[in-house]
């Protein structure tokens, strides 16, 4: 149980285009999801907290107009990287915290999306 | 957020126990100690967590010092599939609206 999926697993796009990444909780509902970014050889950095039905909360230094987050349902959050540039190339990972106590109070992570901007 | 300190890397041999240390001298009374691991090119995976008492599950054991200023993740018999970066994270247990702050973790290498 407590499975989180991401789509796509990897994407290559041209500079200046936008890319959407989906994060789904498959067997639980999650009011709160999180988006992280991880550069090579570095740790995960929290970008934003996504709340169903309300605006996302962004960490300091993360541009909200560049990284658009939509949490339209209790099982889906999307991250759109707008006007992507090569420096946005990274490994993007989402996590979700189940609403029900059955899965405890843990965060469950998706497998990640490798974004390469050329 | 309370900070944790872990060795950058450790090595182990297959089928031997591994003890991964974590120092968290500024831990507060409501902080839970969480361990996650991240295999190459994958998202992190929950391993174990505890508050005061030692904990065991099918993946590992967590030994927490009496003063809670340090803890040790124990893998009883390392396998090649346990090669990963292990993160020790403190989570404020005061509410459900918490964030996880990842440090650099410990890169565990398992030799065949």
Image (spheres, grey):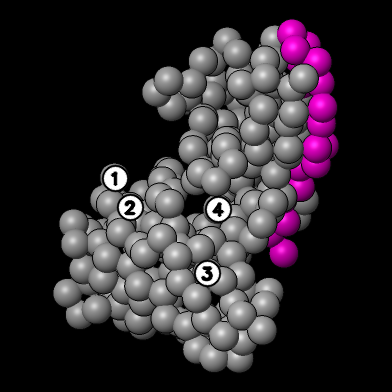
Q: Which residues are magenta?
A: A1-19
Under circle 2, the secondary element is: strand
State the residue position of label 1. Answer: B1
Q: Would you identify the image quadrant in which residue B59 lies?
A: bottom right
Residue A45 visible in the picture: yes
Q: Which label number is shown at residue B96?
A: none
CA separation, marks 1 and 3?
25 Å
CA separation, marks 2 and 4?
13 Å
Label 2 with label 1: CB-CB less than 8 Å? yes
Q: Would you identify the image quadrant in which residue A93 lies?
A: top right
Q: Residues within 10 Å of mark 1 (few under 14, many from 20)?
A: some
Q: Nearest the camera: A107 or B97?
A: A107
CA separation, marks 2 and 3?
26 Å
Chain to which mark 2 belongs: B
State the residue position of label 2. Answer: B92
Rendered residue at 35%/73% (across/down): B21
Choose the circle earlier in sequence order: 2 or 3.
2
Q: Looking at the figure, which quarter contains the C terminus of chain A? A: top right
State the residue position of label 4. Answer: A107
Rendered residue at 75%/12% (across/down): A15
Q: Nearest the camera: A12 or A56?
A: A12
- Mark 4 and mark 1, same subunit? no
Under circle 1, the secondary element is: loop
* Residue B43 x %, y %: 65, 52
Which callout, 2 or 3, points to the residue nearer the camera?
3
State the residue position of label 3. Answer: B108
Q: Residues within 10 Å of mark 4 (few under 14, many from 20)?
A: many
Under circle 3, the secondary element is: strand
Residue A106 horizontal side relative to residue A69, left or right: left
* Residue A33 x %, y %: 59, 39
- Mark 2 and mark 4, same subunit? no
């Amino acid at each position: 149980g407590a499975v989180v999926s991401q789509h796509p697993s990897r994407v290559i796009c041209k500079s200046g285009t936008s890319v959407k990444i989906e994060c789904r909780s498959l067997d639980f509902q999650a009011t709160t999801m999180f988006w992280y970014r991880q550069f090579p050889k570095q740790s995960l950095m929290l970008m934003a907290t996504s709340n169903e039905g309300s605006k996302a909360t962004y960490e300091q230094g993360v541009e909200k107009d560049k990284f658009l987050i939509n949490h339209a349902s209790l099982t889906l959050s999307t991250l759109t990287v707008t006007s992507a540039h090569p420096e946005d190339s990274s490994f993007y990972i989402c996590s979700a915290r189940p609403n029900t106590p059955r899965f405890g109070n843990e965060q469950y992570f998706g497998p990640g999306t490798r974004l390469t901007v050329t | 957020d309370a900070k944790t300190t872990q060795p950058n890397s450790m090595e182990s041999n297959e089928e031997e126990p591994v003890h991964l240390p974590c120092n968290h001298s500024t831990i507060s009374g409501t902080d839970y100690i969480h361990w996650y691991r991240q295999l190459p090119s994958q998202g992190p995976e929950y391993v174990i967590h505890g508050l005061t008492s030692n904990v065991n599950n099918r993946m590992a054991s967590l030994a927490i010092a009496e003063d809670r200023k340090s803890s040790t993740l124990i893998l009883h018999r390392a396998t090649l599939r346990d090669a990963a970066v292990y993160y020790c994270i403190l989570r404020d247990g005061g509410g459900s609206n918490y964030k996880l702050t990842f440090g650099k973790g410990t890169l565990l290498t398992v030799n065949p």
